[in-house]
Structures are given as C-alpha cells and as structure tokens.
Amino acid sequence: MTRPMKETFQTLLALTLAVGTWVTSPALALDPPRIVIGSPVIEPMPVAVPTFIDEGGAGDYAREISNVVISDLEGTGFFRNIGEEAHISRITSFDGGVAFEDWKAINAQVLVTGAVSVAGDRITVKFRAYDVFNGNTLEGAALQFAGTTDGWRRMAHKVADVIYSKITGESGYFDSRVVFVAESGPKNQRLKRLAVMDYDGANVAYLTDSSSIVIAPRFSPAGDRILYTSYETGFPRITLMDVGSLDRRTLDEQPGTMTFAPRFSPDGGTVVFSLERGGNTDISTLSLGSGQLSHLTNAPSIETAPSFSPDGSQIVFESDRSGTPQIYVMPAGGGEGTRISGGKGRYGTPVWSPRGDYIAFTKQNEGRFHIGVMRTDGTEERLLTASFLDEGPTWAPNGRVLMFTRETSGSGGQASLWSVDITGRNLKQIPTEGPASDPAWSPLLP
Amino acid sequence: MQTRFQTGTVVSAIGHAGLVLWVLVGDWLFAQEPPEDIIVTSVSMISSEEFDALQAAATAVPAEEPAPQRPEPRPEPEPVAEPEPAPEPEPLPEPEPEPLPEPEPEPEPVPEPEPVPEPPPSEAPQAEEEQAIQSDSTEIQPAPEAEEIIAPDPVQPETEAETSDTPEPAVSEDPAAEEVIEQEPTEETVAEDTGDVTQTEANEEQDAETGMTTSVRPKSRPERAAPEPEPEPEAEPEVAAAEPTEEPPAEEPAEEQPVDDQSTEDAIAALLGEASEEPVEEASETGGQDLPQGPPLTGGEMGDISSAIARRWNLGAASTDVMSTMVVIRVSFAQDGKPVSFELLEADGPTQAAIDNLFSIAKRAVNRTHTEGGIPLPPDKFDTWRVLDLVFDANGMRVR
Amino acid sequence: MSIAAKSLLLIAVLGLAACNNPDRYGAGGAGAGGAGGAGGMGGIDTTGLGDPNNPTSIAYFNQTVGDRVLFAVDQSTLSPEARGILTAQANWLNQNPGYAAIIEGHADEQGTREYNLALGARRAAAVQNFLVSQGVAANRLRTTSYGKEKPLEVCSEEVCYAKNRRAETKLLAGAGA
C-alpha cells in the first residue's frame, strides 16, 4: 500500500469508526484512552533477602534461615535472588523502615526483611515482605513465627510460603514433607526402605528397615498416616503406618489375594486400592472405620492405580480394558468409567491434583516415559518431561509442582527424585543421599 | 526333616533376637523428629504515622548509624561458618519417636499499614563486601525460556503440539520417531470456557467498591462424555490468547471493540490518532471524572506505551490462574508522568485471587516502567494521558 | 527324604542366612524386623536346595525340570515352550507331594510399578491355572507378583527384558499350603 493510499484508507476508516463512536456514546463524558499492553515477559522475579537481623542470640540461625528462604523461593523458578553484594541499603533494624529507592535501583521487586532471636531452645522469626515498586508491604506478609530451634527450617519454609503465596496468589508448598522409598544395592537385588524428608531433601528420617520390599507410600490427607505396599509377609500387602508412633498394621487379610496401589480418600477414612484375585486386578475400597470392603470394578482387565478427586466424588484409575493401559474416571461408588486419555501410547498412575483442575499421569510412548498433565476430561494434555523412565507423579500441596521418579537405564540404573512445574519449567533433581523412588508429597504442614 | 533345620534354627534365632531388639529399641532410636511447635503471631505493626516518623528519623540521622546490637555492618565477607547451604539431606534419624509437628493455628495474615511511599533515598552505608548469599540455585538462574526447560532430554520444546492421537488399543512397541508433546487446548475448549462465565453466576462477583465487573470463572472444565480426543489443528497464539475472554459477560461495558489484539489495536489507535479531530473513546459511566482533552495519542505513541510497559510486565511468578486472567486498570498520572493512582476497572479470571494478583502485577509493571526510564508519554498531551485505561490480558500465557 | 538331610545341612544354613539381612544393613529403623524376618521370607527362602542329581530335590526341579517360564511383552499367555516346562513341573509336583509351591510373576522394567505388579499377577495365575489343569492340587500352589521389583537381568535391552518377563515356581518343602 502506498502511503497516500494508506492514509486515505485510514482516514476513511477512522471517520467511520469515529462516527460509530459518536453514535454509541451520546453522553459527552469520555473514557480515557484505552491501551492494550503487549505480551508479557516470563522471567524470574528479582528479590532481595538481606540476611535476617540477629535480634539476640540468633547466631548462625539468622543467616541459615535467610538462606533457606532464598533457596525455597529460587527453587520455584519464579524468583531470582539479588546477592547481598549488590545491595545498596543495609537493613539494620527490623522496624526501621525501608528506602525503596535503593531497592528499586537494583531492580529488587520484592524485598524481604527479617529478624531472628533465640532464647534457650526457643526461636522467634519475624519478617516483612515489601512490594518495592508498588511501595508497600505485601498484604499479610508481615508475620512472626515462634518455635523450638530444631524446627528452624520449618520456620524458614513458613516465611517463604507466605511470601510465595502473597506474590503468586497461590498457596505455597515449602513447609511440607515427602515420603519416599530409599533404595540401595544393585538393580537385581534392590533394597528398599521407607523414608521421609522435607520437600527439599533435608531432614531425612527412615521409617522402616530394608528387610522387605516396600513400594509406593502415600500420605493421608492430614499427613499423620502413611499407606504403602510391603512384602513383609512375602506377598504384597497394604500397610498402614502411623507416622508419629511408627505403628503399623496390614490391611485386608483375605488369603490368596494381593493388595497394592493404595491411596486415601480426601477425608482420610477410606482406602482405595487394587485387589488381585486369581490373576485379575480390580479396584476396591476399604473403610478404615467399619472395615467395609466394596468392589468398585469387576472386569477381566487390569484396573489399578486409583486416585480420588479432591471432592471425593470421583476416582481416576488406570485400566487396560481397551488393550493398553489408559486412564478412566468413574464415580467414587464404582461404575463403568469414562476413558479420558486419548493419545498414542500407554498411560498410567493418574493422580488428581489437589486443586482439582488437572490429572497428572505417567505416559509411555515410543520407548520413552513422560510425566504429563491433562484436564480432568482429558483435554489439554501436556507432557512435561521425557526420559528413559519417568513415573509416578505426586502433587505438591498447592497443585503447582509435580515430583516423580526418574530412573536411568542399564545395569547401573538408579532411581532419583525430580520435580517439575506444571508449566514444564524448572525441572530439577531433589537431592537425596542415595537412590530414591516413589515420592509422595504431604499436605502443607499445619 | 527336623534335623535338617536345627543348625539353621539356631542361627536364625540369633538373628531374630537381634531383630527383636531392633523392634524394641528401633522405634525409640530412629523415629521421626519431634514436633516443633511453631507459634505464629503477627509482627507488631507500626502505624503510618510512626512509619513516617521513622522515615523522617532515618533521613535525619544518616543511616550509617549503627544499629544498637551490631556496631558494624559486619565487614567480613564470609565469616559465619556457613554450615550448609540449603537442601542438605540430614542422614541421621531422629532419636525420639514423636508425632509429626503438632497442628498449630495457621499464621493469621495481618493487615499491614502500608508504609508510605518511598522515603528519600537514604545515604545508607555503601556495602562493604558482604558475601553473596549462597544458595543452591544452580539450575534456576536466569530463567530459560519456557520451552527449553521442559526436559533435558530429546523431548522437543513443548511448542504447541497437535496430538492427533485417537484412542487406539494396540500397544505400539515400535519406536517411531514422532514425539507427541502436547495435546492442544482447542479454541473451542477455550470458548466453552467463556461460555461458562455467564451461567455460573454463583461465582460471579461484583466489586462494589471499584464498581468494576469481576467474573470468576469456574475452574473445572465441563466433563466430556467420551474420550474422543480429536486433534484440532491449531490456530495460533496471540489471537487465540486474547480472544476468548475478550468478550466478557454481558454486563461488561460495551466499549470493548478495539481491544482484541495488540496489532489490531495499534492499527486502530493509529487510525484514530490520525483522524485527529475525534476523541477516541466513548462515554464513561464508570469514572466519569477526568475527561481527557487535548490531542489524541497516535497509534505509534500508544504502541510505545504498550511495549514499554509490556517489557516490565512479568508473569514469571504468577499462578496458573493468573495466566487466564485479564484486568483493565485505570491509571492517573502526574504531569511528570509518575503514576499516582490505580483503579481496577474490569476483570475476568478464574479466581478473585488471580484477579487481585494480576492487578498487583500490572501496577508493578507500570510503576517499574516509570522508575526505569519512564513511560513514553508525550509531554504535550498531558491532558490526554492524565488518565489511561490499560488492558493486561494474560490469557494464553499458561500454554506456552 | 531323610537320606539327603545330612549332606544338606550346610546349604540349609546358607539359606537361613537370608534371615540376617536386616542386620547387615543395620542403620535400619524400627523396621519390618519382627514379623518380616521370620514369617516373611521363611517359607520361601529357607529350604535347602538338595543335590541336583537327586530327582526329588529342589535343585533338580530348578535345573532339570525348569523352574521358570518366559512371556512375551505385555502378555500372560503361555507359549508352547512354556507349556512344555509347566507340564514337566506338574509331573514333578505330582510325584513329589511333599512340596508346595509359590509362583512368582515378574515383569520387565518397561511399565509403571503398579501396572507391572498386576501384570506379574496375571502371569503367575496363568502358570497356576495350567499346573492345576495338569492335576496339581490347587491348595499346594500360591501366587504372588513382584512386578518389576526383582529383575533377574539388569541390562535395559530386550535380551534382558525377555528373561525378566517370567514366572518362577518356587518350591516349599514340607508345607501343604
């Protein structure tokens, strides 16, 4: 289009529009110009977390806690910490006010200040988070936590959870635990034992020894109990463990059967699991209170890996009734089930997000494994990872991050724990002291 | 048969005795961590007057004033023994079997008096050489683009994918080369979504205070009856992204027209700009206050403003809900171009939290743009831009 | 049966040593010790194998008769070769009524843990059903599945996978299940 022509055209169009505007706006008052802002950027938000102030007896705790807060925030991939060497202002007093200009100058969009004091075995941590460019304290992000010194990491996690939730608008997941299977020994003689750790791999504690194979532990909704499958009797059996006392009991003693793949219902009162009899595996529920056993499926195919929806009304599971393992959803009381997985390949281990919006799964296709998510009706399938063997996703309590098992191939193959954001960003390995598999995330701790 | 087992039995008995010991003692030796009672209280708030006073004091007394307990801002670089950086698995099982941390009341978010804007830059002591904080952030650093993070493996970037898979029964053991990355949300899915808005009035909210319209979309998608995932060829991004939510529920002011897409918008703005005699927008029922007068902004000017702010509009720390939210904010500017007030005019998103959040993000973007070199507002048209309505539509970001 | 007893003592002792596992990996927790150590492995692992030349020994069963059959990918149907082996197993079991057996189903590592457990169970059941059809009393047989938990071969190639997709018939001396 030549310029004169273009102008003519534009003028014409503009006049038409203008007339239209006049017509639709008889009142003479005018709206301000409206501007559509272009595409946003997606990059970690720069934050500054000056070392928390020692308000008495804090010693190393002040720095340690600051470091954990930074590690939590950066670990999400959402934030980038601006190292203290770049800071212009020093925070010398917790209530001393903040020179926003100094933080703007280094482009710190969020500033976290804190103070720690210790008396005996009691530790107090307080913090404030500022929205630097909006020039205010993040609403609700000024709190104080008090507890025992051995819980200092939890306090740091709680600080980070508050900051995360105030900035992102979704709840955090740092003050949480993960139960998993710690592995050792060669591939053909693997030793497995249950262990729990903080979500970031710290504070590992073992719950069983490795005398018998244990697999796939799951936390109860309150985080106080764990269901898992154990070969203690020589046969796979679902075991319920009280996390506090480590007391255990085996569920469902029907002879001649195998039970495995347990999960709690959202109210914690029911276990849904796979019951194998005569070579056929179906899904059943067991009420922990009454001992009432119900069979939800009854098909010659394999039905396994059930998981409740967070409202308890539905169960998603895996079945090979179509010839290959695929994902189905059925009412919590049982029933036919509707297939929701439609892609090529094999789908397994579906898990309903705690937010209810997605189902995470393992997919096997073309000789590789993927962790993926889809809507609960099967649409919007997205694969987040790919490797020789990725399996068994578990949701962070906020439904934003998945942790799963990744195993390397070959005779030296080993399992490790990884996490990935549901956008597919921020794939990373969770540090564990040895090989590890089958992670299950706890709810956010109280 | 019996004899055969005798020696074995003895051996076994010894082993088992050991085990029994473990059982007896192990619980005590290797149990969970003791509960940590964490008590949450709100930090004592200071009122804004107090804050002002503090600020004044801070400015009066040079910030060099050492804090009482810490005479010096700690000159040594890495003095503290830095026991360990963050996630260091601690191998030792804890001694006492005690229940996991006791439930404690949740931290109650406490409203915080907003510190008055920034005090004059204080002459804080320039940093000695404090040690950069150590953190295990190795792979986190400068966020790679969404795509490449997906996986270190041969998966390709999850650009959009057309998983045209139909449910098929047979296992394909054969490694073909094709990678199915993503089954794309189809446009029609998105559209359905918008449809839901109107019918779910339970979720709809009117924010009386701002007079804005907020529609909260239901989160879950309608259940599809059957698994027939037909792949839909994909139409692409920008349009797709903006469109669906762009026609908001009925009560949305009708002056929505030019907003669909940036380029379209720019073009139209340009047209309007060049048409010059006519004011751009229609009547305002909402604010009504400042009537822009003066010459309209040209398309180029509007485009400059749009992209300057877009460069600081960062969704890197946003919830997935935010990625399907749109807000329109009304910003008033001082004559020097400094944004002085913000009002949430319209919003559409799945949750109120996401709307609030996008509002904060939008404000931050505008404030940052001002701070970092300014918003390109033509000085001679103050009367035109003293109030601007800015549209931040984050829809579609999630899928990237 | 007592003929072999003395000569088998040593082997028996070795077998029993399996009980010591928990101690070997001492740093254990509260552990499965009590029940697991005794009851768990007891029935399966603590039997002497005997002399492979003695046709009534477990070693003979394992090596000469053949204690395992293999399966195709994802399958639990018995191949003609597997049927041959199982027919021999059935004959042996019918001639040696003092033994019971546990049939363990296994899968290769391609597949999720849960699915492979179920698949292993299917394979074990296929073997059990066949043995019963050959006249072995059902109450002498039990099944279990290890899914992909106990591979025989450790490489990640079909040559190993093929050997891992299996069902093993493990004899238990004495007990009639």
Image: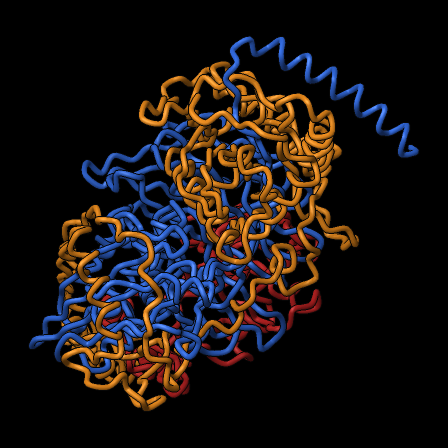
Q: Nearer the viewer, residue C171 or B230?
A: B230
Residue A431 in the figure: left or right of residue A410:
left
Front residue of A346 and B259: B259
Q: Is residue A314 left or right of residue A1?
A: left
Q: Which chain is red?
A: C
Q: Position of residue B261 (x, y in %)?
A: 67, 33
Q: Is any part of residue C70 visible from this angle?
A: yes
Left or right, A161 with respect to B342, comes to left
What x and y, as percent, mark residue A242?
A: 20, 56
Of the 4 image quadrants, the one containing the N terminus of chain B is bottom left
* Residue situated furthest left in the rendering: A120
Q: The chain drawn orange is chain what?
A: B
Percent across and percent down for residue B321 are 46, 39
In the displayed structure, A125 sits above or below B330; it is below
Q: Which hue belongs to chain A?
A: blue
Question: Which residue is located at x 71 percent, y 28 percent?
Answer: B268
- Residue B60 falls in image quadrant: bottom left
